[in-house]
Image: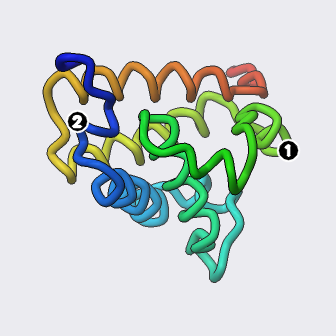
Amino acid sequence: MTAGLTPFELLGGIEPVTELANRFYDAMERDEPELTAVHRLSAPGRVHPESRAAFALFLVFWLGGPPQYLAVHGHPRLRMRHNHIAIDTGQRDAWLRAMTTAMDEMAITGDVRAYLDQRFATVAEAMRNTPDAPSG
């Protein structure tokens, strides 16, 4: 990473990080209907605006920005908050595809992109809580 700057700072602050969250959900709604369906929806195929806002606040905090997420939602406890959803490799990969699309659309590149690719993959794998069905 660049000279001690956080990913939040490298991305440009609250507005670009919020845009990343929204582009992520836009890509999910457009390209990943099975993943969209496990979210709180405001209309068929549309993730609820409160879910979008909470994820944007989380990303701001997680990427090194202001900790407003903690004040509003408490500790992230990602696995606990997602435990009611069966997350297998298919769901993990769908999540990563939507985030990759969002980052591609925003032309996020270089060191910050390499960092985000690695961190998102690590967290997505850690969220997996359901074994894949045996093939055959």
Quick check: 93 above or below 41?
above
Q: Nearer the viewer, residue 19 or 25?
A: 19
According to the picture, the residue beneath numbered tag 1 turns out to be: 84
Q: Nearer the viewer, residue 39 or 94?
A: 39
Q: CA distance from mark 1 to mark 2?
A: 34 Å
> Between disc 1 and disc 2, whose residue precedes?
2
| Residue plotted at (82% across, 35% down) | 80
Q: Quadrant of residue 117?
A: top left
Kindly give the residue lying farthest to the bottom in the view shown. Answer: 43
Question: For the residue marked with disc 2, what is the amino acid?
Answer: Leu
Q: Quadrant of residue 110?
A: top left
According to the picture, the residue beneath numbered tag 2 turns out to be: 10
Give percent across and percent down for residue 36.
59, 60
Quick check: 135 above or below 54?
above
| Residue plotted at (42% across, 41% down) | 65
Looking at the rendered structure, the secondary structure element under dot 1 is: loop
| Residue plotted at (18% across, 20% down) | 2
Direction from residue 69 to residue 4 in the image, left or right: left
Question: For the residue marked with disc 1, what is the amino acid?
Answer: His
